[in-house]
Image (cartoon, grey):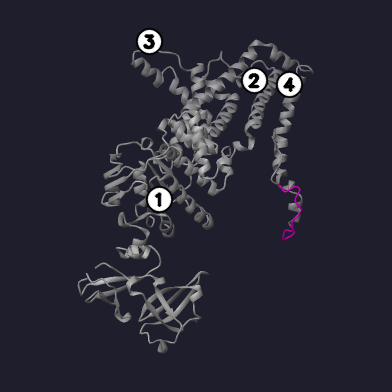
Amino acid sequence: MTTARSLCLRSLSKSYMPGQNAVDGIDLDIRPGEFISFLGPSGSGKTTTLMMIAGFEQPTAGEISIAGRQIDAVAPYDRNIGMVFQNYALFPHMSVAQNVGFPLRMRRTARAEADRKIAAVLAMVGLADFAGRAPKALSGGQQQRVALARALVFEPDLVLLDEPLGALDKTLREQMQVELKRIHRELGVTMIYVTHDQTEAMAMSDRIAVFNHGHIEQVGTPAEVYFAPRTRFVASFIGDSNLFDGRTGSDGVVDLGPLGPIATGRRDLAPGQTVSVLVRPETIRISAQTPAASGERRLLTIEETVNYGDSFLVLGKSGGRDIRIRVPSIDMPDLPRGAQCAFDWTASRAHVIGA
Amino acid sequence: MALQLTDTTAPATAAPRRVPGGWTWLVRAPFILYAPAALFLAVFFLVPLGLVVWTSISEPELGLGNYAEFFASTYDLGVLARTFRTALIVTLVSLVFAYPVAYVAARKGGTIGAFLLGVVALSFWTSFLVRTYAWMVIMGARGPVVGLLVALGVEPAPQLLFTTFAATFAMAHMLVPFMVLALYAVMRRIDETHMRAAASLGARPWRAFATVYLPQSLPGVLNGATLVFITCLGFYVTPTLIGSPQDKMIAGRIGQEMEQLLEFGAASATSMILLAAALALFALYDRFFGIERMWR
């Protein structure tokens, strides 16, 4: 149905005030048919980048090209990019079918063909019976589907989604995530998804571009950015984390001070460097046995336990450092506040940052 | 038709609630709250209106003679037709001037918009009479407009003051603020991302405007047009002072009947016809669009 296109950003910059770049020299290659998320806190430049791709903001410097064709000088209405806005931006004076048919009307598509396409896309988003309704008569999730259908119906080269699920409640959001992935699979169209919600980005993306202060800190698969973040920012922004400062020794061992040495297996590290070591909370195991009996050298003093239903978050201190541990509920021992217990981590899952 | 003059917000059917401090009588009898206003309207509006109705059917003799005379007189019917035509032209002219102003003013974050709105408000707060005299000076035989035309070599200098053109133009100027505010109120609520959405879907700026913005602004156009048209129907000062004496509007005709011809019965009948025309328009508007929407 659609032909997947690549998108290429070269040294893309946007400056609103001299000396301050909202987007600062971004280089990114997006593959045809890829689902990529722009993830970052607000003000990190992800939305500005999206607006430049859509053509609503002019880059101060750099190039944007779709499938090798530079589009910087092309007006938004000629870019053939579908966009789903955060507040849906459905036209209230038009019915669902008229909204979805709008891009076809602008392209002077023949009536019969347009009707066929509208029916097909509405069926795809599960709104076949709602063609005659006014947007206001639909629920938030349904309006979101209409906006999506409208952005897909004209077979765009690229689909941009600007925090499209932000206004929906949690259950509906998860439902729409699955739906969106299915539609992406069916159409194979290149999609760029802007979000500040890291679980959403993790759940949906082929790759994630992590934005911070106008830069891309890292581009990678969800597993890469989660288990092998390149910077402390990526490590702390995505998922829950323990970041320990340490000093490299020989044979990939990092000395974490009061927490003792950890064998990271990174034999390429030169000794004597200051590094950060990321240990994800769910890779730490807790033992309810008394410290003396277990023989473990790492001891934790429990400060707080938080029950999430499927798991517990254990907050404690060891050697003066804050430690966060994620324990599956079925493995959770009875640990009152102030209790001491032993803990251990899978050293091979620890990740060294900033060597 | 839902032209209601009575209070609809009072919980007339709701069971009396217990209000602390012995104020339950207020909840039981909400009419006490609007009694002063109702009394005022009765004394200063309904009674005089009744007197006008009575005069129209009793002077010089009892009967509908004054009304019959009005509808038999080609002159009076001509005045009525001219009044409607002028009101229509004024409405269209003020719409043409007001729409772009309101459009710019309604866009968020613009200093130009705030400035324009300030100018409109200033004009809104200046009395009709003052503005009418200003137009008399501007359009007068020795005024700047005629002076400019003469300097440009237009010979002989055209008569501007005391023409229907001058009156129409000045009335449009008086009523532009009403139109701007009516349009602004509606345009302010139009989501700005709609134009972006239209662009991303392939609409060039003018098509986006015509297909997305304009239809959403139509309620404002309708409100403004109704407001301006009805206000214009009863315009007295401006057409009398600036307009052509031959091209009288209906309010001017009433004045003439009162002051020069001393035909109070005829004047009253003409007033009632004007009132009926305005009410008919309101009824039409209400029938199709709902009167309460006008003030939201």
Which disc, if any, is residue B11? none
Label 2 is placed on what type of residue?
Ile
Q: Are marks 3 and 2 on the same chain?
A: yes
Label 3 is placed on what type of residue?
Glu
Secondary element at tag 1? strand
Residue bearing the label numbered 4: B56
Residue bearing the label numbered 2: B254
Disc 4, disc 1: CB below 8 Å?
A: no
Disc 3, disc 2: CB below 8 Å?
A: no
Q: The numbered mark 4 sits on a residue in which chain? A: B
Q: Report the magenta residues as a range.
A: B10-22
Decide: is A242 above or below A222: below
Nearer to us of marks 4 and 1 is 1
Between residue A351 and residue B41, name the one nearer to us.
A351
Residue bearing the label numbered 3: B155
Q: Position of residue B151 (x, y in %)?
A: 34, 16
Q: Is residue B114 left or right of residue B296?
A: left
Structural crowding at the residue carrying mark 4, measured as other residues with C-alpha within 10 Å and reported as few (<14), some (14–19) or many (≥20): many
Residue in the picture at 64% in, 27% down: B281
Q: Are marks 4 and 3 on the same chain?
A: yes
Residue bearing the label numbered 1: A193
Magenta: main secondary structure equals loop
Q: The numbered mark 1 sits on a residue in which chain? A: A
Q: Quadrant of the C terminus of chain A?
A: bottom left
Nearer to us of marks 1 and 3 is 1
Disc 1, disc 3: CB below 8 Å?
A: no
Structural crowding at the residue carrying mark 2, measured as other residues with C-alpha within 10 Å and reported as few (<14), some (14–19) or many (≥20): many
Sequence-earlier tag: 4 or 2: 4
Sequence-earlier tag: 4 or 3: 4
Label 1 is placed on what type of residue?
Tyr
